[in-house]
Amino acid sequence: MDAVKSVPELVNNDLFKELPSKRRRFLVSRLKRVEFSAGTQVIKKGRSGQFLGILERGRVMQENGRSHTRPLTSGQSFGSEMLRFGKPSASTITTQTDTVIWVLNRSDWLAPSSPPQPKTEDPGKPRYKKTGWISLISTLILLTIMFTLGPIMLEHANNSIPNYMVESGRTDLAEQYLRFMLQVQPGSARLQGKLGDNLALQGKEQEAIEAYQQAITIDEYLPWIHNNLGVLLLKQNEALLASDHFLKALNLDPENIDAYRNLGNAYYSLKEWGAAANAFQMALEIDSSLIDIKADWAGLILYESHLEDARDAWEEVLLDNPRHHLALQGLGVISLLEKDPTQALIYLDAARYFNPGDLTTRLYIGLAQEALDRPEEAAAEYQFVKDKGSEPELFSLADTLLTVVEEQTAPELYPD
């Protein structure tokens, strides 16, 4: 039997009723027949399936994640939001019997029914000047890709060509390409997002933020755009707004380790230590080998007096990377808390060696020197932090500690 004749009649589906018959015939030709055995999860809620499913025979259960379920039977469909807008699946679809489903991919939904007829040249129009021949050829090539090879090839070109330009050191040329393609595809959220990435690489952060925001206006269901926008907002000290975008990224992609790390950094900026620790811990539950995140997490749980857990984490980090300055610094702090300044100084000197510019390490070294009754050495460290530091809180703390040490070592004005 001819496969096209056995598919569900698209005209009966609300999604296709208003389409011209030629377009419906084209979409029917793109349907693919897929068989599923009983108990198969066809799509999980929150996953990006990028297709519409039309049930030919069998029985499936549709569950939206809030204990609301309903059976689907022959002729019914699911995934219209995935097909039309590229959104994640709003439901989990599981077969209850052996089932046949006709699948229409979003790439076919977006594909033109047939290439447009070429326009005839108007002999009365002036020819392009020689300086514009490159743009003309580029336009023809891109339009050929778009109309003859379809949106999949065009999307591949939009990914690979700017990436090649960036790798070649031509971020400016990549920007020009992306801006041109946005004239061809003004409704492409992905192109807007890639433009934002490119502008961020060039240090044009405000323009990048605007590009990301435009992308989200077009399609708010792209987690990487929320994450990258959050990173730039965090750099501009908009930690609260940044955390909102990181959370949206995680709602769309619950295993996005970068978004968890960035969310932790945002909460840290907001001085929400517990929330920051939880965000880092979620990243570690996905991948426990992330030593940088583990080191950050250990520093946060130390604030909650989880000293042994912090020590274990930093020691694990050092097993993987003995030069990790943050782990060395952390173990030095634990030694200070345990009133062992000699051991603390060993760790802290090593941390300073591997990261000489870390002023926090220098501050802790001053505390260790002071605990060892070396006020001159401690004062030198505090003075160094004052001279080099730019953070007001760190400067103020170093200034206070320096004043205390100087008062303790100053000669009495009126000796007995």
Image: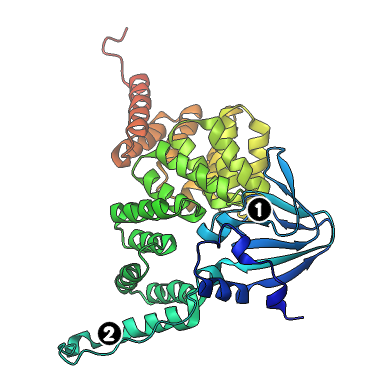
Q: Amino acid at mark 2?
A: Leu
> Are there few (<14), some (14-19), or many (20+) residues within 10 Å of tag 2?
few
| Residue 111 visible in the current orientation | yes
Residue 305 is left or right of residue 84, and the answer is: right
| Residue 139: mark | none
Q: Amino acid at mark 1?
A: Ser
Residue 37 is left or right of residue 174, and the answer is: right
Element on which disc 2 rests: helix
Q: Which residue is mark 1?
A: 289
For the point 65% across and 42% down, the residue is 313
| Screen quadrant of the C terminus | top left
Q: Quadrant of residue 202 in the image?
A: bottom left
Residue 57 is left or right of residue 346, and the answer is: right
Where in the figure is residue 183, as x and y percent of width and height? 31, 69
For the point 53% across and 39% down, the residue is 345
Q: Which residue is mark 2?
A: 136
For the point 41% across and 74% down, the residue is 167
CB contact under 8 Å: marks 2 and 1 = no
